[in-house]
Amino acid sequence: MRLDRPCHGPTAEWRLLDALLLAITLAAVTPAWAATPEEALDQAVRLRFPALLVEHPDAPSLSLEWLDANWQDEFVPMALEIVRFIPQRAAGQALLAMVARKTGVQGPGNDWSAWMRWQWTRPAPPPSFAAFKASLYSNLDPRFEEYFSPQFTTLIRLDEIVWGGVLQDGIPPLRQPKMLPARNAGYLAETDVVFGIEINGDARAYPKRILAWHEMFVDRVGNIDVAGVYCTLCGAAIVYETVVDGRAHALGTSGFLYRSNKLMYDAATQSLWNTLEGRPVVGPLAGKDISLPTREVVTTTWGDWRRRHPRTTVLSLDTGHRRDYDEGEAYRLYFATDALMFPVPGDDTRLHNKQEVLIPRFGKPGERPLAISSGFLRKSTAWHGRYGGRDFVVLTDHSGAHRIYALKSGQRVRGWDGDAAVTDGSGVAWTLTESALVSVDQRLPRLSSHNTFWFGWRAAHPDTALVTADGIAR
């Protein structure tokens, strides 16, 4: 990623407060030096970095001269944060050249993504960075300031929280969206991808072609309040219950990313939530031991979901928004290559970035995360494993959809027709349902899992064990 203003999503906006124009005046009348390091840091946060954003021919040179004369290491993460937004390209390049000169790092050049990957190998920024980040992003959306108070608990590095190019809810969630009976969903083809959920007998399908534009739905399914989160960039679709210990959390799209995975926010506290984990990681709720329960979701085709659930409902195209909801239109260029839109720390070439993996979500606390290659599972359609202290089987049906079910200790699946009929090693017949494998008098429960792109999961969990072509976790 080069020095271009970022844009992620259909409603990206850029604005600066008129008050920033004051910065150029102040820069002209204040000394070119600071009396103390503390004074220099304060002036850099309040004045010198903001002055780089003013579209005035003299503002950048004055600020760059001052930053050069008063440089300290605390300026590095600030410079890398603000450089994306500097309107004069030459000024942005000059700032990166200054960072290179001051740190002795030359390799990244004008490549912002490379600079960020380097920054993330360094110690986390000092507390002053939170105030800087709050001030910077309040110019885009005043609500952003509430995300980054220096007094808040932070469980992730603030410099790894990257603006995605939209305002709060700029990618608008679908709240209590209109649903259609399956017979009225003529807009869907049999092969269109849907995210299917069934709760207490209430089956619903949420087409990828719609959710790719909205990335979240908030709904009540089977009398359970849920939020379905689809991170388009990392390919993860996860369904969470939104009531925890009697407290309802009204979730939305924050506008920010963590390791190329969207961060949610809650309306009551403006805390930022990790989408992959369903827990708050920055803000008043961070560190409060809050974790959203998951519900089973399957990524499948509309034709297969409708056949299994003839009474299902499905999202209506009448969303209240104007989008091109044709299959594959959203993020077409992004999905066409293996390139990423935003940087992530490190890389892992065991799989290509956007190859799909299945993530079991039932590990024990502290257990090494596990990812299973979807390509491998489509060849090994009844794959046995052990994780979280329990035996399980992944059943992959004719549509390529994966579902995980618990097994009794030592139990194996001997026969699987790729649809609904399962036979275990003792000859007992089982029927696949969304919630369990069911026999005449027994149930083997479905276990929580979701699909995602390899790069997104590995970036969040670098220690992940991966099952690939030989079926062995490494």
Image: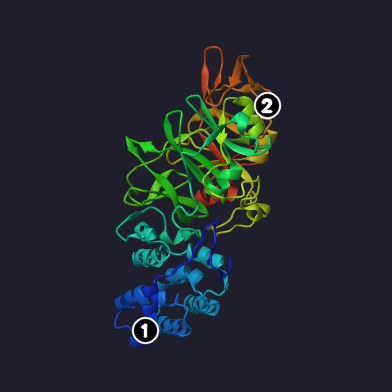
Point out the image quarter for the C terminus. top right
Q: Which residue is mark 1?
A: 25
Q: Are marks 2 and 1 in contact (CB under 8 Å)?
A: no
Left or right: residue 148 compared with residue 179: left
In the rendering, at what x and y percent does residue 53 appear?
Answer: 45, 75
- Asked if residue 226 is positioned above or below residue 230 in the image, the reply reads above
Indicate the amino acid at tag 1.
Answer: Thr
Residue 146 visible within the image: yes
Indicate which label's residue lies in the foreground, 2 or 1: 1
Q: Which residue is mark 2?
A: 418
Left or right: residue 62 compared with residue 405: left
Left or right: residue 52 compared with residue 114: left
How many marks do you count on the picture?
2
In the rendering, at what x and y percent does residue 369 appear?
Answer: 51, 42
- Asked if residue 331 is positioned above or below residue 36 in the image, the reply reads above
In the rendering, at what x and y percent does residue 366 appear?
Answer: 43, 41
Which residue occupies the foreground of this view, 404 or 15?
15
Which residue occupies the foreground of this view, 361 or 283?
283
Indicate the amino acid at tag 2.
Answer: Gly
Q: How is the image coloured?
A: rainbow
Q: Earlier in the sequence, mark 2 or mark 1?
A: 1
How many residues crowd around disc 1 within 10 Å: few (fewer than 14), some, or many (20 or more)? few
Residue 72 visible within the image: no
Whole-angstrom CA distance, mark 2 to mark 1, is 71 Å
Quarter of the figure with residue 144: bottom left
Point out the image quarter for the N terminus. bottom right
Identity of the residue drawn at 47% across and 36% down: 363
In the rendering, at what x and y percent does residue 318 appear?
Answer: 55, 42
- Mark number for residue 465? none
Which residue lies most toward the top here? 440
Which residue occupies the foreground of this view, 224 or 374?
224
Identity of the residue drawn at 34% across and 65% down: 131
